[in-house]
Image (spheres, grey):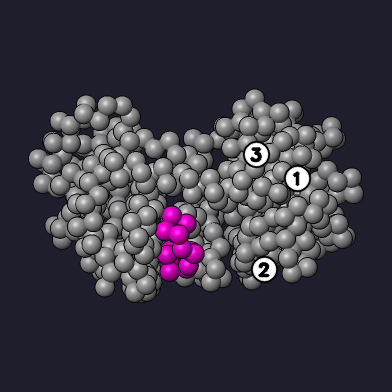
Amino acid sequence: MSAALMVQGCGSDVGKSTLVAGLCRLFANRGLRVRPFKPQNMSNNAAVTADGGEIGRAQAVQAQACRTAPTVDMNPVLLKPQSDVGAQLIVRGHMQGNWTARGFQDRKAGLLEVAVDSFRRLQSEADLVLVEGAGSPAEINLRRGDIANMGFARASQTPVVLVGDIDRGHVIAALVGAHAVLDPDDLAMIRGFMINKFRGDPSLFDDGRAEIVRRTGWPDLGMAPWLAAARRLPAEDAVVLERSSGDGAGGRVRIIAPLLRGLSNFDDFDPLRAEPDVDFAFVPPGQPLPRDADLIVLPGSKSTLSDLAMLRAEGWDIDLKAHVRQGGKVLGLCGGYQMLGRRVADPQGIEGEPGVAAGLGLLDVETTLTANKTLRPASGRLARSDAAFAGYEIHVGATVGPGCARPFLIHADGRADGAVSADGRIAGAYVHGLFDRPEARAAILADLGAASTPGDHADEVDKALDEIAEMLDRRLDIDAIARIAGL
């Protein structure tokens, strides 16, 4: 059986995903076969796997850190929120229907066996499996039937390291408080603690770390600094607003996207953030879409009808049509493409309550959502410029209509995808990751009058992973972490 270690946190967004990704790259750089694993994730930022399923985007990035292809076993249970109380359940990469929060609580214990089985398969092919928890084990009200934290750790007998986030404050209370409330058998799984996101002189917190050791008895495994390179990794749901402003502020062209409630796959825009000629930003609810935007992108959505209603409630549909009247350009990605058509129908209630609504009417197409979910890698060329693209499809529904006679993309297998308006200013397609490849990105930006930097976005993610791994190697007790994992 291969070595294993589980990284749990004192809360959401304490940096677990980044730390696991950095450790994956660190140990992979030492020649080990490393695999990432997260028993249960909740995110609308998903990735398509080579084996034809979907997992959380964070685990796909961690797989990249391991220099291996992502598989459905790396995240066997994925919840994709569709409302405040319900989510689509994905098990081993495939949709299992919609579940309320209460319904999932009642069923999740039965998914523990699925999670452990996937974990064991990864162990059979690796020297080390690095496991990421979800939320916090100190949320003891959720302990019954838990599969995300201590429930999984104990079922698989995987040792745990607990992470506290000093940037949000009260890190001593968070770690010592977790020690105070955990069940003794759960407490026994924790073999040490790490502190994340420290800014400044680390010696200033020596006394604080010593106090945590004194009060918990846990070994101190080190303190990671604020990792600026983490901002170049695909975003997690909880940090979208924090990252809403673009790196290219003051760039030649302004690209904006409305911040939809059901926003999905928002890492589509990460390559644009790195472009000096581009000023990219999400527009939050309560603000109009800027009149000076060169391109408005309607992003992917986990709930197309609901987000279409939100567009109208915010008045963004009026802003969008004014933008078009003034000669502006619009691009719809996946759910955003569906909204641009004349009609969207969900007769089976695939994404919520059954219903039908008029679309924005900017493309001569219409969409019907069905239970069949498309999950596949995608590559080909932009129809108008012949520039190469590579990405993936992850959607329910089929879109048809006269507008499809002018496709936006031509796939490598000859399939046409998407639609373009007669004047060429409005377009949409189902492919995510459209801006990742330099050829496609350059062609789209050139159409706006902007230059593009060379290089594949995946290469930039690789550089960030190496920087994070190097920093963790300097600041954490990697030898102790390796011993805890069983190396």
Tell me the quarter of the picture where residue 146 sits: bottom left
Vertical relation: 49 (above or below) 184: below
- First to last magenta residue range: 64-77
Give yes or no for residue 471 being in the magenta stretch.
no
Give the Cα distance between marks 2 and 3: 39 Å
Give the Cα distance between marks 3 and 1: 11 Å
Q: Rate crowding at label 3 as few (under 14), some (14 to 19) or many (20 or more) other CA atoms within 10 Å.
A: some
Residue type of the residue flagged with mark 2: Thr
Give the left or right position of residue 191, taking residue 85 as reference: left
Q: Position of residue 24 (x, y in %)?
A: 37, 55
Q: Which residue is mark 3?
A: 453
Q: Secondary structure at mark 1?
A: helix
Give the Cα distance between marks 1 and 2: 33 Å
Pick whichever, 101 or 263, lies toward us: 263
Q: Which residue is mark 1?
A: 443
Q: Position of residue 99 (x, y in %)?
A: 49, 64
Give yes or no for residue 70 being in the magenta stretch.
yes
Q: Residue at x 83, y 52 (%)?
A: 384
Q: Secondary structure at mark 2?
A: strand
